[in-house]
Image: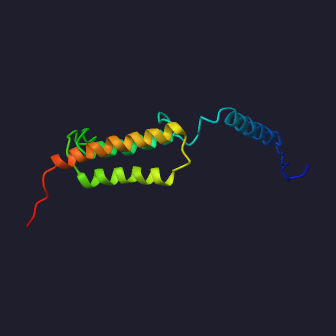
Amino acid sequence: MSDEKKIIVDEDWKSQVEAEKEALQQETNDNPSSSTTDPPGMPPASFELLLSTLATEAMVAMGQLPHPVTQEASINIPHARYAIDMLEMLQAKTKGNLETGEDQLLTDLLHQLRMLFISADQMAPAPKTE
């Protein structure tokens, strides 16, 4: 007998891994809405969710909703203006590329936020002058 050990290579695991990859790929193709990159419990990314996020940010800045950390309503006009400007930029950059419902949602949302902005701007304390 020789002192060398006999090396046994198990080739079966390669075919098993390949079969699992193909099954996962098929499952992903069959169900495109489920994404492995989305954290659990998070809604799927959408244009409407992006608009809602920016609108909520503007409403918090205008004192319409309490701040999520402090739970207090306060007015921050520059921040509100920035959030509304972001929505206006999205409207300009996506012009002609939105579905009818998305375009109408963005137009209505901007109108409502602009009206709230005028009201919040009038209610905000005047900046201090030195």
* Rendering colour mode: rainbow
Residue 90 in the image, given as x and y percentages of width and height:
45, 51
Residue 14 in the image, given as x and y percentages of width and height:
79, 43
Residue 108's image quarter? top left
Q: Residue furthest toward the right? A: 1
Residue 59 in the image, given as x and y percentages of width and height:
29, 42
In the depicted view, which residue is nearer to us: 63 or 38?
63
In the depicted view, which residue is nearer to us: 55 or 70?
55
Q: Is residue 86 left or right of residue 126?
A: right
Quadrant where the C terminus is found in the figure: bottom left
In the depicted view, which residue is nearer to us: 32 or 53?
53
**Residue sitting at x 51%, y 50%:** 95
Total marks drawn? 0
Q: Residue furthest toward the left? A: 130
Q: Is residue 126 left or right of residue 55?
A: left
**Residue sitting at x 67%, y 36%:** 28
Q: Is residue 100 left or right of residue 110?
A: right
Residue 68's image quarter? top left
In the depicted view, which residue is nearer to us: 23 or 6?
23
Residue 114 in the image, given as x and y percentages of width and height:
31, 46
